[in-house]
Amino acid sequence: MKAIVNISLKAGVLDSQGKAVHHALDSLHFEGVNDVRVGKQIVLQLSENDKDKAMAEVTKMCEEILANTVIEDYEIELV
Amino acid sequence: MKVSILQFPGTNCDYDTQYAFERLGAQTEIIWHKSETIPEETNLLVVAGGFSYGDYLRSGAIAKFSPVMKAVIAYANDGGKVLGICNGFQILTEAGLLPGALKRNDGLHFLSKHHRLKVENTDNDFLKKLQGGDIVNIPIAHHDGNYFIDPKGLEELYANKQILLTYCDENGSVKNPNGSIDSIAGICNTTKNVFGLMPHPERAMETMLGSDDGVKMLQGFLES
């Protein structure tokens, strides 16, 4: 099973990179972009095939190391 | 006085820190991160600056799981004095020994220059040789120095006088190089035995190199 973890700064925490990308899009005249957030994606190949167990394990990984929950949110997708 | 200095793969301020404390008359020892203990006679443990583990994932995120960190946390919880400089500050926040987190600088650039800092609270071992309102000239060198803490945490920092230093200009007016909340450059924990700051006092030990304001700062630890 594969786990895709998306990590981004929490809402309310200023995302300077997102802001810079937004400015760049504006200067290239891409209109209608209301907000840009830049995050990172971590893809894990797991030997676990049970979805619930995999979700519990990856959640633990996120809480302990993959994300810093003081400033970051994470989303886990299992495929 | 014995100062133990942590060294991770990627630490690069270990020898500067050693030089600074030896110049002040302390005995020093460099502790490799694989060590599971720190010397018993340690009076001050310094987590030196650099780029531990290449700053992969997040600055300090991987270093916090190094074997030596269990001993560091036990030492700090036992009342031992710990100082984290730059990457050391990032490691101490990641390890939960100091509140908040360090984000990418608002301007997205790596900053390397001298910067003025205002001394905020001096009722602690680190800054006791300085006066509140003093302005010191100390180098900064970081990419992720943008201090963040939630509003409740910030209130606690003020209430417990945990803010050590803020960024300012020559006259002491606020000048924020990296976007840190309330221009915070350094903090301590509530029990005032764990200290962290982004600027490098160990690089301000000689007037011929721009400033010796770091001497008064680090001396605080050597005098009881």
Image: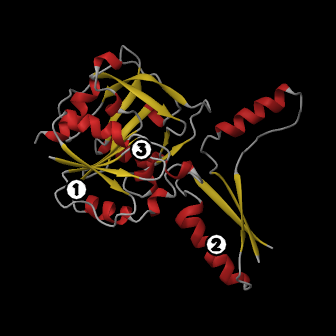
User: Which residue was labeled with disc 3?
Assistant: B154
Q: Amino acid at mark 3?
A: Leu
Query: Is residue B103 or residue B138 the one in the foreground?
Result: B138
Marks 1 and 3 sit apart, C-alpha to C-alpha, by: 24 Å
User: Which residue was labeled with disc 2?
Assistant: A58
Q: Amino acid at mark 1?
A: Gly
> Could you tell me which chain the residue with mark 3 belongs to?
B
Residue drawn at x 63%, y 57% as measured from the top left: A73
- Which callout, 3 or 2, points to the residue nearer the camera? 2
Residue B31 occupies quadrant: bottom left
Residue B80 - label: 1
Disc 3 crowd rating (10 Å Cα; few below 14, some 14-19, many 20+) is some
| Placement of B46 over or under B37, stated as above or below | above
Disc 2 with disc 1 on a shared chain: no
Residue drawn at x 58%, y 40% as measured from the top left: B104
Q: Secondary structure at mark 1?
A: loop
Residue A49 showing in the rendered view: yes
Q: Are marks 2 and 1 in contact (CB under 8 Å)?
A: no
Query: Is residue A63 or residue B203 the one in the foreground?
Result: B203
> Could you tell me which chain the residue with mark 2 belongs to?
A
Q: Secondary structure at mark 2?
A: helix
Task: Give the farthest residue toward the top.
Answer: B171
Counting from the top left corner in percent of width and height, residue A22 is at: 77, 34
Residue B129 - label: none
